[in-house]
Image (spheres, rainbow, N blue to C red):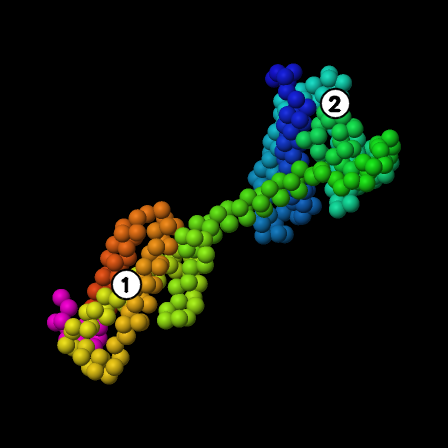
């Protein structure tokens, strides 16, 4: 493994990843060992999960698991950790910095500061590995430990910190990426007029803002359905009673519906980047299909079943 050309940040990044793997393996080994010890302290057969015929086998499996996990830890030290730590020593031990893992934590030059305790938890600032103390203090600002950096200028210590623990940064970036994906999905579904204004698809003077492409598509199909259905009924003798009662839509209402169809299709075409006529034909076919379905249901339930073939 040639580490001579790698930067302190590259080496410490790989080290941090290796140490994280070691921690996970050690945790698994600890629980496996605890399970084995628990079996030794429990008389065989007194617990249904440790019946005599399975006791020895399971006990042996747990200790085999511990040996395997510890072997993996040893390999990580031999292949990943020790060579990098030796390179750190060979280069004269470049600077490393640690942020106390709490809301008011300070940045330290090592993990042995007198202001900390044996129980103190740190976040390793691997992105700052190899950075000069002066540059680190400029970034840490008010979070710089005055014991580790007693020479830090007072004006620097008054500034807000620009450092962020790797774990917190990772969580923040994940949240931002999730929100960006949600915003992108929402934008893909959203619709406005081609001019970027709210798309009002209310009928007969009412106001109804369509916020999604789907809502506009439904409105376009429904408006074309209403127009075609009105034309069909106006010449259909079976619907004479409907118009004799004065229920036929007025010319103004028909004009409103025609405008609604044009207005919604215009917005859909702009949203999809497709020609108006192509979008119109798509929704015209959908309206025709909706009419046929309605006629079939009408013929089945209320009319002569021979009316629709």
Is 212 placed left or right of 74 in the picture? left
Residue 35, placed above or below residue 87: below
Main SS of the magenta part reads loop
198, above or below 25, in the image: below
* Residue at point 64%, 37% (across, down): 24
Pick whichever, 54 or 284, lies toward us.
Answer: 284
Q: Residue at x 78, y 37 (%)?
A: 141
Residue 63 vertical placement versus 197 (above, below):
above
Does residue 164 appear in this view?
Answer: yes
For label 2, the residue is 94
Residue 136 lies in magenta, yes or no?
no
Q: Quadrant of residue 167?
A: top right
- What segment is highlighted magenta in the picture? 297-309
Mark 2 packing: few (<14 Cα in 10 Å), some, or many (20+)?
Answer: some
Q: Residues within 10 Å of mark 1 (few under 14, many from 20)?
A: many
Q: How many marks?
A: 2
Image coordinates for residue 118, horizontal then vertical, percent: 81, 39
């Amino acid at each position: 493994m040639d580490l001579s050309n790698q930067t302190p940040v590259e080496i410490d990044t790989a080290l941090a990843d290796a140490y994280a793997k070691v921690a996970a393996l050690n945790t698994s080994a600890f629980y496996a060992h605890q399970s084995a010890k628990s079996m030794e302290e429990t008389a065989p057969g007194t617990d249904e999960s440790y019946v005599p015929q399975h006791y020895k086998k399971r006990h042996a499996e747990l200790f085999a698991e511990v040996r395997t996990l510890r072997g993996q830890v040893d390999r990580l030290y031999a292949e990943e950790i020790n060579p990098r730590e030796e390179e750190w020593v060979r280069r004269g031990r470049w600077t490393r910095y640690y942020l106390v893992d709490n809301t008011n934590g300070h940045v330290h030059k090592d993990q042995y500061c007198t202001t900390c305790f044996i129980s103190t938890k740190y976040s390793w600032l691997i992105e700052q590995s190899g950075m000069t103390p002066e540059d680190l203090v400029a970034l840490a600002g008010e979070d710089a430990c005055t014991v580790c950096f007693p020479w830090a200028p007072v004006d620097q210590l008054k500034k807000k910190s620009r450092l962020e623990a790797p774990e917190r940064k990772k969580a923040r970036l994940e949240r931002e990426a999730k929100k960006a994906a949600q915003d992108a999905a929402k934008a893909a579904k959203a619709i406005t007029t081609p001019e970027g204004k709210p798309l009002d698809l209310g009928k007969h003077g009412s106001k109804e803002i369509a916020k999604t492409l789907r809502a506009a598509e439904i409105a376009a199909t429904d408006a074309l359905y209403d127009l075609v259905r009105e034309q069909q009924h106006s010449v259909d003798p079976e619907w004479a009673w409907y118009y004799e009662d004065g229920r036929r839509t007025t010319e103004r209402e028909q004009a409103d519906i025609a405008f609604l169809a044009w207005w919604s299709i215009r917005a859909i075409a702009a949203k999809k980047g497709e020609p108006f006529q192509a979008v119109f034909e798509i929704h015209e076919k959908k309206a025709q299909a909706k009419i046929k379905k309605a006629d079939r249901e009408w013929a089945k339930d209320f009319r002569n079943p021979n009316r629709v073939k």
